[in-house]
Amino acid sequence: MDLPSLLQYLITGLTVGATYGLTALGFTIIFNTTGIINFAQGEFVMLGGMMSVYFMRALGLPEPAAIALAVAGTTALGALVERLAIRPVRNCPAINLIIITIGVSILIRGAAMLVWGKDTFALPPFTGAAPLLFLGAAVMPQSLWVLAISLLILVGLKTFFSRSIHGKAMLACSFDPKAAALVGIGVDRMILLSFMISALVGAIGGAILAPITLTSFDVGVLLGLKGFAACILGGLGNPYGAAAGGLILGVLESLGAGLISSAYKDALAFVILLALLFVRPSGLFGQKDGKRV
């Protein structure tokens, strides 16, 4: 394989992998606060793209305003999911809550199909579609936007959890909700905030990816599954591992499509996940569980 082709696969993989990483971050944020896997996370990603297209076409808003409104709307929906679907049954076993999130995913996807139909849509690239040449490889300007925004989100979340009062309170809830409640932390508010942040991150990922891969009512299914695979690959509960897992998964998927066949591109993510679980169940960056005997 020549260098330009390798770079092309690498750039493509990093671009798509950044979105997988953002989706995985959404899974991680909710898991760390509640201990459940939110399988509606892929629908948050879908809504970020679909609502942006709708607000541009129906309301005639400029693209930045349409994306901002779509992200705000999806964040509000994340709050509604927590208040209406999760909070009333929060004391149920985790498996029950996971099944509820699957039901929420189906509901959102069905509603999106009824509102927007089954067609595919695309957002215009943020700064034009003319590719930039780098060592013989073509780099789309939108790819740079995806990578830059993903990095900003990761840095922003790092700052939020390490320096803000609310971020530290969310981390406290993830370690021991009962102890957090005893020192005056509103556990319910922290769980609500985790769903809102998760929806916000997912919506941004969907909006920045829509100019590259198109969007439709059902794209959230596969994006959610690959985001979950990236989350497990990096180590469940590790936000930086989730982001790294998304990038690794995207690059391996791109290389597999280029070197083997694009027909196996989507299956490759799950083959990698199964292979990893046999070798290292805790993920690449997860800590192995220890037991004192």
Image (cartoon, rainbow, N blue to C red):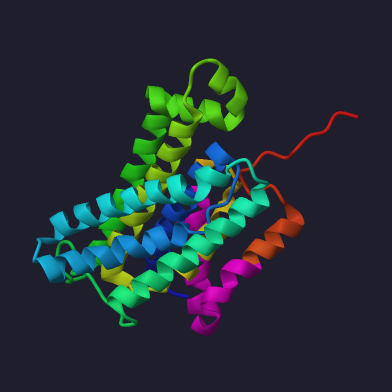
Q: Say which residue appears at 69% left-offset and 58% top-offset.
A: 276
Image location of residue 70, percent across then percent down: 25, 57
**Image quadrant where one finds the C terminus:** top right
Residue 235 is left or right of residue 17, and the answer is: right
Q: In the displayed image of the protein, which residue is found farthest to the top?
A: 183
Q: In the displayed image of the protein, which residue is found farthest to the front?
A: 88
Name the residue nearer the viewer: 80 or 293. 80
Q: Say which residue appears at 22% left-offset and 68% top-offset.
A: 53
Residue 167 appears in which quarter of the rendering?
top left
Which residue range is magenta in the image?
242-271
Image location of residue 81, percent across then percent down: 43, 51
Determine whether 35 is above or below 220 in the image. above
Q: Is residue 28 visible?
A: no
Q: In the displayed image of the protein, which residue is found farthest to the right?
A: 293
Q: Specify whether residue 220 is painted magenta.
A: no
Q: Specify whether residue 246 is painted magenta.
A: yes
Image location of residue 87, percent across then percent down: 51, 43
Determine whether 154 is above or below 44 in the image. above
Name the residue nearer the viewer: 117 or 279. 117
Q: Say which residue appears at 14% left-offset and 71% top-offset.
A: 57
Image location of residue 185, percent across then percent down: 48, 22
Determine whether 178 is above or below 131 in the image. above
Give the total of numbered labels. 0
Residue 44 appears in which quarter of the rendering?
bottom left
Q: Is residue 27 visible?
A: yes
Q: Main secondary structure of the magenta part?
A: helix
